[in-house]
Image (tube, grey):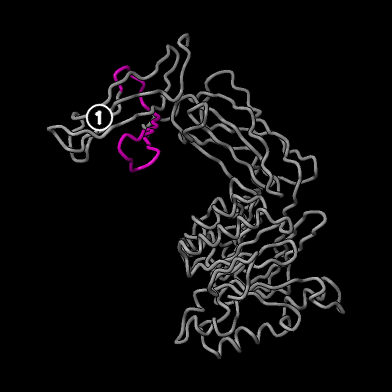
């Protein structure tokens, strides 16, 4: 009913919804339990205003699997196995791909994950990449990519398998999830893709009802019942998305616009920023790193900044990262109703990053920054600046491996920072529960007269047999990953 009213308001009171809308998508949990009564009264009855005009596509949710009939009732109501894209069928009614105009909708099942769905998705994506009639790809699944309430109640298969595959296509626009009874929007960090939760109307879900966590890849979580209208302009290559709210238990809203975002093809990147600090000698904490003003040639506004601070000039080891959106809606606002969300970044200048007292140890560091606009285009990285911290805490050594398991004769890449830099510093490799003296590497650290610098090492180990143990490790080769000139 609410979406029907909004369409009349948006496109004219006398307009036919099918004149402007191609289809609607219900992102799972069409019913509470899979009974005939629920399909009639919860699903079809509530779609009575739009169903005479528009096809209503569905995605499998966890509630479709409940009840005595379970998925059998879902299969009886929908003929999804007849839907194909480029002759590719999933062979079942759990997931499918359907093209509407220049948009390919990929309806995934977060309830039927596995290699079969992954193989099918790869086939669909291969065809779509070579299909000139497809400009955009939108994926959907009931369980979302990320969630800041009921943390962890997501689809790890979607997050770790499906979306990483989809982002390899430059036609991919966004992933739409549900399951949580609210709205959220975020962006993937390194690719121009959105991920949202469109929770619709269902049970209450507000701040303070579950475990909560503020994630970098979520820009806003709003405890509203919502729906979205996606407008695609084929000639210009533009997509605009509007999110409308009807409120919830505590606050009623009448199709109120609470979010809008877009993705336009073939747009320029923001101008390359710079770190404007001048470092003429060692500095003490706190230290504010200043970025230049945001600049864009097409009028786009600043959305995100990223500052990286490293002890390595090539940023192979990150000591500190500041990744922030211009807004960050998370958590309950004040002492009122739990449906009010607070903007944590209100009044924050995200072109500045402050290193607080004792937040990083003494040493030499490198910093760079980049800016992202609201079309999800990243600028180039700024030029790197070097600075030295004194008067802070003494470093705690860190040691990381590139992985946790290795095959025979496979190189082990070990990176360490924060060592004292003495000539007799060493890295030891030894079998668990044995003394480190059995196998250890001794190698002088790189030192200078004015400072000390830790160098990551490439350590290659081989499996050998000896009279001590059948799987002792023998270090066979050492190479520095970063070379310093002998004159330094």
Quadrant for the N terminus, please: bottom right
Where is residue 331 shown, x and y percent of the image? 55, 60
Left or right of residue 230, residue 236 in this image: right
Q: In the rendered image of this protein, does residue 303 appear above or below residue 106?
A: above
Q: Please, is residue 105 above or below residue 53 in the view? A: above
Residue 196 at x, y = what percent? 61, 61
In magenta, the rendered stretch is 399-425
Residue linked to disc 1: 474
Does any portion of residue 339 appear in the rendered image? no
Which is the main secondary structure of the residues drawn in magenta?
loop
Identify which residue, 222 or 157, lies in the foreground: 157
The quarter of the displayed image where residue 451 is located: top left
- The answer to which image quadrant residue 176 occupies is bottom right
Identify the residue shown where x is 57% and y is 71%. Answer: 181
Residue that extends furthest to the front in the rendered view of this protein: 87
What residue lies at 59% left-to-right and 32% top-to-bottom? Answer: 368
Q: Residues within 10 Å of mark 1 (few under 14, many from 20)?
A: some
Q: Quadrant of residue 222?
A: bottom right
């Amino acid at each position: 009913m609410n979406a029907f009213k909004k369409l009349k308001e948006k496109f004219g009171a006398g307009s036919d919804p099918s004149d402007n809308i191609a289809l609607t998508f219900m992102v799972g949990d069409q019913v509470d339990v899979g009974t005939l009564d629920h399909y009639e009264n919860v699903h079809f009855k509530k779609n009575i205003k739009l169903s005479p005009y528009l096809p209503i596509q569905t995605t499998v949710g966890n509630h479709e699997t409940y009840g005595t009939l379970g998925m059998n009732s879902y299969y009886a109501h929908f003929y999804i196995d007849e839907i194909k894209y480029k002759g590719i069928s999933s062979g079942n009614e759990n997931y499918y791909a359907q093209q509407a105009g220049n948009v390919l909708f990929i309806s995934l099942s977060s309830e039927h994950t596995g290699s079969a769905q992954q193989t099918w998705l790869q086939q669909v994506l291969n065809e779509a990449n070579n299909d000139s009639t497809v400009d955009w790809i939108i994926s959907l699944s009931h369980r979302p990519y990320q969630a800041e309430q009921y943390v962890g109640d997501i689809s790890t298969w979607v997050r770790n398998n499906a979306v990483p595959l989809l982002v390899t296509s430059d036609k991919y626009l966004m992933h739409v999830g549900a399951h949580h009874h609210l709205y959220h929007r975020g962006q993937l960090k390194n690719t121009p893709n959105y991920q949202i939760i469109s929770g619709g109307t269902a049970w209450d879900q507000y701040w303070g009802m579950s475990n909560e966590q503020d994630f970098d890849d979520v820009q806003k979580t709003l405890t509203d019942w919502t729906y979205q209208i996606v407008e695609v302009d084929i000639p210009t290559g533009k997509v605009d998305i509007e999110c409308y709210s009807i409120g919830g238990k505590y606050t009623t809203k009448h199709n109120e616009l609470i979010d809008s975002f877009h993705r336009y093809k073939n747009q320029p990147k923001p101008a390359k920023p710079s770190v404007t600090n001048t470092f003429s000698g060692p500095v003490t904490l706190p230290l504010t790193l200043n970025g230049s003003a945001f600049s864009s040639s097409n009028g786009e506004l600043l959305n995100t900044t990223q500052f990286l601070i490293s002890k390595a000039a090539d940023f192979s080891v990150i000591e500190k990262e500041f990744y922030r959106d211009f807004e960050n809606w998370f958590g309950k606002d004040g002492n009122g109703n739990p449906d009010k969300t607070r903007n944590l970044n209100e009044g924050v200048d995200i072109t500045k990053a402050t290193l607080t007292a004792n937040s990083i140890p003494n040493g030499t560091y490198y910093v760079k920054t980049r800016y992202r606009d609201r079309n999800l285009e990243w600028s180039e990285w700024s030029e790197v600046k070097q600075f030295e911290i004194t008067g802070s805490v003494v470093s705690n050594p860190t040691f990381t491996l590139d992985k946790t398991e290795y095959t025979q004769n496979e190189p082990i890449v070990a990176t360490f920072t924060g060592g004292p830099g003495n000539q007799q510093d060493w890295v030891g490799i030894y079998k668990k529960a044995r003394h480190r003296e059995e196998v250890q590497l001794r190698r002088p650290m790189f030192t200078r007269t004015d400072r000390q610098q830790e160098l990551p090492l490439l350590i290659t180990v081989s499996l050998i047999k000896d009279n001590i143990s059948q799987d002792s490790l023998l270090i066979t080769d050492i190479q520095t990953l970063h070379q310093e000139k002998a004159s330094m």
